[in-house]
Image (cartoon, helix red, strand yellow):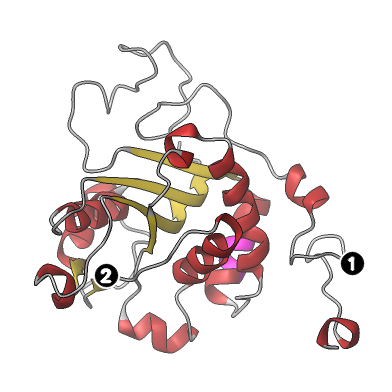
Amino acid sequence: MLSWLYPIVCECCGEPSERSICPGCLAKFPRLPRPICLHCGTHLSYTPPAPDACHACTGKPRPFALVRSALAGTADTMELVYRLKFHRCAYLADGMAAAMAELWSNTPELTDWQHATLVPVPVTPTHLSQRGYNQAEELARALGKQIDRPVACPLHRRETEHSSQIGLSARQRALNAYKAFHAAPAYTAGRASLPSHVVLIDDVYTTGSTARACARALRHLPGVKAVAVLTFARALLD
């Protein structure tokens, strides 16, 4: 009855759709160009020092097993992110998660993790109060329904001097993220648990500071052996 009274239409083209973004419009958004670093997911625009690995990942330990992003962070892609994040458009998460589900199904490293749990990057209590929801959690729950994976929220985010990573340098981002993210007491004490493989979910991957900080916190939890990172978009840095 609700679908009949208030039919879902695509946010981009206005045509009737099963999701907030129809498959046709979603297909028009640019994917990241190949080849990519198989560790951090960045585009390899040069001949790497090691096969399928960028300079930053070659010979260096990483707290996550891999990073993948569904779409390139173009102006149109980031407009969806901004609307989801700052304009109370939580309904967009369903359509945006469809792009992430498509990437998941085409990534053997993720489909092999049959019992993985999705973990959204947390927001500060202030941002949660202002927005009314956590955009990463909205994406995680929408994606979980589409790929049949559970969602858990074992991470918390403290209020720090910089409540947002936007506008910070790479060094500032890393320090701010290191201070901000920690695991909930129930998980550190063993009263709640996660499976051996966890997939961290966020809206945008920029410098990786947030992903690294969250992955480290997750890797310290009992039983967690590997963490992957999956985001809707990847920022295009100069």
Question: Residue 85 at what x, y percent from top left?
Answer: 53, 71
10 Å neighbourhood of mark 1: few (<14), some, or many (≥20)? some
Residue beneath the point at 60% across and 76% down: 90
Q: Disc number at residue 89? A: none
Look at label 2 and name its amino acid. Answer: Pro
Kindly indicate the quadrant of the structure image that contains residue 186: bottom left
Q: Is residue 157 above or below residue 221?
A: below
Q: Which residue corresponds to mark 1?
A: 16
Q: What type of secondary structure mainly makes up the magenta span?
A: helix
Mark 1 or 2 closer to N-term? Answer: 1
Question: Which residues, given as a range, are shown in magenta?
Answer: 79-83
Q: Position of residue 56 (x, y in %)?
A: 27, 28
| Residue 120 visible (yes or no) | yes
Provide residue 101's location: percent of width, then percent of height: 59, 50
Q: Is residue 235 left or right of residue 67?
A: right
Q: Amino acid at mark 1?
A: Pro
Quadrant where the image shows the N terminus: bottom right
> At 47% across and 26% down in the image, what residue appears?
36
- Name the foreground residue: 225 vs 47: 225
Q: CA distance from mark 1 to mark 2?
A: 37 Å
- When asked about the image quadrant of residue 88, the answer is bottom right
Binning the other alpha carbons within 10 Å of mark 2 as few (below 14), some (14 to 19) or many (20 upward) gives many
Of all residues, the one furthest to the left in this rendering is 189
Q: Residue at point 34% right, 23% down?
A: 54
Q: Is residue 207 above or below residue 238?
A: below
